[in-house]
Each structure stands twice: as structure tokens, then as C-alpha cells.
């Protein structure tokens, strides 16, 4: 079984502080014991000096586990099928429909995780996806990847909650069309929601997922069909 822990981050003072703190707790409470490789993805803004600064902040016994991977420039290029003017009008809506309306770069980041990430980790069986501000606050004594494999699991997350209706707009119709034979399962996941003007949502998405499942033909077809999420989505409509 091959597994890795993955970040996507930026080289600025705030994100670097978050990343160093996240890595500190990752190794303190989990990965010093289990020693899985950690891949830090970036948009080419981490030069050798910046990378070494992060490496030096990690306990010496674990530094060899961390590598950096620059992304292909086209990964964060707006897709041709997206109407950029329409996108800009949506982003400029005031007041924002939800607190986490976010900007173009954030939506491109969501798209990257969904559409581009898999090509970088296709040789792994499992990956753990962490934000650079994800902090593990207590010891994890169980090998989470072994637990996934032993139980034949495809996906696990640290929280299940009801997301904002605006951010999930269109998902119900999409999944009903793509998976007409799974109406019972969809009914248990998708619920009616009244969207108040002052709607509030939370942002706790951290997960472990099976790479073979994410690379399956069925999953790939569904993802390709749902590319318009970058225009209509809020914080996390991926």
C-alpha cells in the first residue's frame, strides 16, 4: 500500500506560518510515528530558499519525508468553456450571497483539487488532503491509511455537516441525472434547505480518499460533466 499526505499552499508570510504550524502538529501527533511521505504542492512560487525554510522548521528526524512539487502553469488557467465576464459579474455581487463567496483564485484552487490533483498522485493508493491551516490537536495512534485499506474504504472525512444551499445549487439535479439508479442514497444525502439572507457556513473539509476510485471511469465522467462548478459554486462546490 502506497500513501501520502498532501498540501497545496502559497509562498507568503501568512500561509508559511500556517504551513509550518500544520506540519509541526502533523509530525508531533501522527506522522513521526507512521512516516508517510508529505508532498507540498505550489504554483512555482516556492524557490529553493523558501523550501529550505519550511524544511528547517520540521524536526530533523522527519525532514526527509517532505518534498515540494511545482504545478503545471496550465493547472490554474481559467478553462476555455468558462465565460470570464460572467464569472467576474458573479464574483462582484454585493453583498456576497454567502460569507465564503471567495475570489477567482480560490475557485481555481477548488477546481484543481477536483480535476488536476489526481495526475500528481496516481501512483498512490491513498492520499490524505490537508489544508495548510489544518492542525491535528491530539495524538492519532491509529494508522489511518491502514485503517482505510483494512476496511476497504474509499473516502473518509473528519466531519459531516449540512452545507450552504447556495454553494450546492444544482448538485441535486446533477447527481439525479448522472446516477438515476441511486435515488435512495441521494435522498439521504441531499435535503431541502431554506437559504436565509444571513446564511453562515463552516469550512472544515479535510479528507482521506482512495486514488483508484477517484480515477475510475465513472468518477471521471461525473467530474468532467460538472465543470461549471467554478462559475456557480461558492466556497466549496466541487
Image: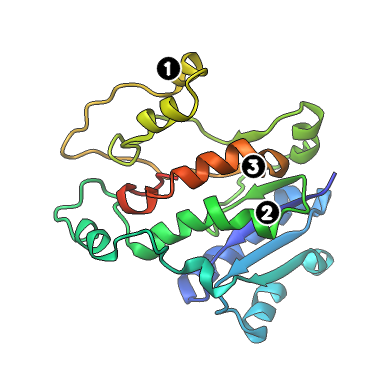
Task: Give the side of residue 151 with respect to residue 23, left or right.
Answer: right
Query: Which residue is identified by label 1?
Result: 187
Q: Residues within 10 Å of mark 1 (few under 14, many from 20)?
A: few
Q: Residues within 10 Å of mark 2 (few under 14, many from 20)?
A: many
Percent of width and height locating residue 51: 66, 78
Residue 58 showing in the rendered view: no
Q: Secondary structure at mark 1?
A: helix
Q: Quadrant of residue 209?
A: top right
Q: Name the residue rendered at 55%, 59% in the picture.
A: 132
At horizontal 43% and vertical 44% (from top left) the residue drawn is: 226
- Residue at position x 51%, y 18% in the image: 182
Horizontal side of residue 45 vs 142, given as left or right? left
- Residue 128's label in the rendered image is none
* Residue 68 shows in the view: yes
Quickly name the residue at label 3. 214
180 w.r.t. 30: above or below: above
Where does residue 137 sit, x and y in percent of width and height?
A: 60, 46
| Above or below, 52 relative to 87 | below
Q: Could you tell me residue 85's position as x and y percent?
A: 23, 65
Q: Label 3 vs label 1: CA separation? A: 22 Å
Secondary structure of the residue carrying tag 2 is helix
Q: Earlier in the sequence, mark 2 or mark 3?
A: 2
Residue nearer the viewer, 82 or 109: 82
Q: Nearer the viewer, residue 94 or 184?
A: 184
The tag earlier along the polypeptide, 2 or 1, is 2
Tell me how far mark 2 sits from mark 3, CA to CA: 25 Å
Mark 3 secondary-structure assignment: helix
Q: Tell me the mark number nearer the camera, choosing from 2 and 1.
A: 1
Name the residue that disc number 2 marks: 26
Amino acid at each position: 500500500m502506497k500513501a501520502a499526505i498532501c498540501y497545496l499552499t502559497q509562498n507568503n508570510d501568512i500561509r508559511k506560518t500556517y504551513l509550518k504550524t500544520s506540519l509541526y502538529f502533523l509530525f508531533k501527533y501522527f506522522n513521526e510515528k507512521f512516516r508517510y511521505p508529505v508532498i507540498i504542492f505550489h504554483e512555482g512560487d516556492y524557490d529553493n530558499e523558501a523550501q529550505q525554510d519550511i524544511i528547517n522548521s520540521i524536526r530533523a528526524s522527519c525532514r526527509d519525508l517532505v518534498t515540494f512539487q511545482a504545478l503545471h502553469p496550465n493547472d490554474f488557467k481559467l478553462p476555455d468553456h468558462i465565460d470570464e465576464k460572467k464569472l467576474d459579474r458573479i464574483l462582484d455581487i454585493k453583498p456576497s450571497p454567502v460569507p465564503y463567496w471567495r475570489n477567482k483564485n480560490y475557485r481555481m484552487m477548488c477546481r484543481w483539487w477536483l480535476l488536476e490533483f489526481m495526475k500528481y498522485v496516481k501512483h498512490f493508493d491513498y492520499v490524505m488532503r490537508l489544508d495548510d491551516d489544518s492542525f491535528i490537536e491530539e495524538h492519532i495512534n491509529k494508522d489511518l491509511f491502514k485503517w482505510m485499506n483494512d476496511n476497504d474504504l474509499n473516502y473518509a472525512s473528519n466531519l459531516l455537516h449540512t452545507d450552504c444551499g447556495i454553494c450546492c445549487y444544482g448538485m441535486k439535479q446533477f447527481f439525479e441525472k448522472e446516477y438515476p439508479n441511486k435515488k435512495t442514497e441521494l435522498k439521504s444525502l441531499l435535503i431541502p434547505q431554506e437559504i436565509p439572507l444571513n446564511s453562515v457556513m463552516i469550512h472544515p473539509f479535510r479528507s482521506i480518499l482512495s486514488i483508484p476510485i477517484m480515477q475510475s471511469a465513472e468518477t471521471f465522467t461525473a467530474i468532467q460533466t460538472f465543470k461549471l462548478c467554478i462559475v456557480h459554486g461558492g466556497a466549496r462546490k466541487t
